[in-house]
């Protein structure tokens, strides 16, 4: 995510107060992944699963000893900057204990962000009846091969956990591969946005 990290850094340096992180970009990459594997955005019950029409992404937020999951609704209809602002607002409401019931309802998939804890990877638990959860680890500088040379690159690990009653291994892998390609290549990410 070297190019993405540079874009985020440049936005922070604009000085206009814009606070942007990896999360809105991850949300848009998840949106692209769901176009390939729609069953990732579903509710699963004992008698089957139901694909969800809306894409409402919950973002796990630590509040003291608790974990709450406010939901960014209608992700498909929002820009990166709109998503960034809504994530910020919901996190502030969570930390000040001002979330309303509707702020934590109707999530169709959840993200857990390990970056603030300097954790590289984890296997999160699905928030049922959702069929999937995605974790993003902290961005780290590591050696990478680029055009035959070794360079310092920023990398993250994105982990997906799926309810196998709805999402088997191959579709889950296709979903994660789509997220990977969108986060690694800004052209793919930006051109794929609607």
Image: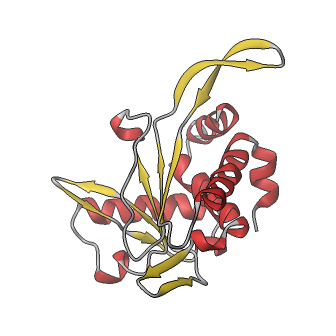
Q: Is residue 157 above or below residue 32?
A: above
The residue lying at 50 percent from left, 66 percent from top is: 164
Is residue 80 visible in the rendered structure shown here?
no
Quadrant, the N terminus: top right
Q: Is residue 194 left or right of residue 20?
A: right
Q: Is residue 167 above or below residue 148?
A: below
Q: Position of residue 64 (x, y in %)?
A: 17, 53
Colour mode of the rendering: secondary structure
Q: Nearest the camera: 47 or 146?
A: 47
Which residue occupies the extreme bottom position in the image? 47
Quadrant, the C terminus: bottom right
Q: Position of residue 133 (x, y in %)?
A: 46, 60
Residue 158 image-quadrant placement? top right
The residue lying at 70 percent from left, 62 percent from top is: 32
Q: Position of residue 47 (x, y in %)?
A: 45, 88
Residue 156 image-quadrant placement? top right
Is residue 148 visible in the rendered structure shown here?
yes
Q: Is residue 56 left or right of residue 31?
A: left
């Amino acid at each position: 995510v070297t190019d993405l990290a540079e874009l985020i850094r440049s936005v922070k340096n604009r000085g206009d107060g814009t606070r942007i992180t990896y999360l809105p970009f991850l949300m848009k990459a998840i949106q692209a992944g769901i176009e390939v594997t729609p069953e990732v955005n579903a509710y699963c019950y004992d008698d089957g699963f139901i694909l969800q029409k809306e894409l409402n992404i919950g973002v796990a937020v630590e509040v003291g000893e608790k974990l709450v999951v406010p939901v960014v609704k209608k992700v498909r209809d929002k820009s990166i900057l709109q998503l960034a602002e809504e994530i910020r607002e919901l996190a502030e409401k969570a930390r000040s204990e001002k979330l309303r019931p509707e702020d934590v309802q109707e999530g169709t998939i959840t993200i857990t962000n390990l970056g603030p804890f300097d954790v590289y990877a984890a296997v999160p638990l699905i928030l049922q009846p959702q069929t999937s959860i995605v974790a993003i680890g902290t961005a780290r500088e590591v050696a990478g091969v680029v055009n035959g040379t070794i360079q310092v690159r920023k990398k993250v690990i994105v982990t997906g956990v799926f309810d196998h009653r709805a999402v088997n291994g191959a579709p889950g892998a296709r979903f994660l591969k789509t997220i990977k390609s969108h986060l690694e290549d800004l052209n793919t990410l930006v051109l794929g946005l609607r």
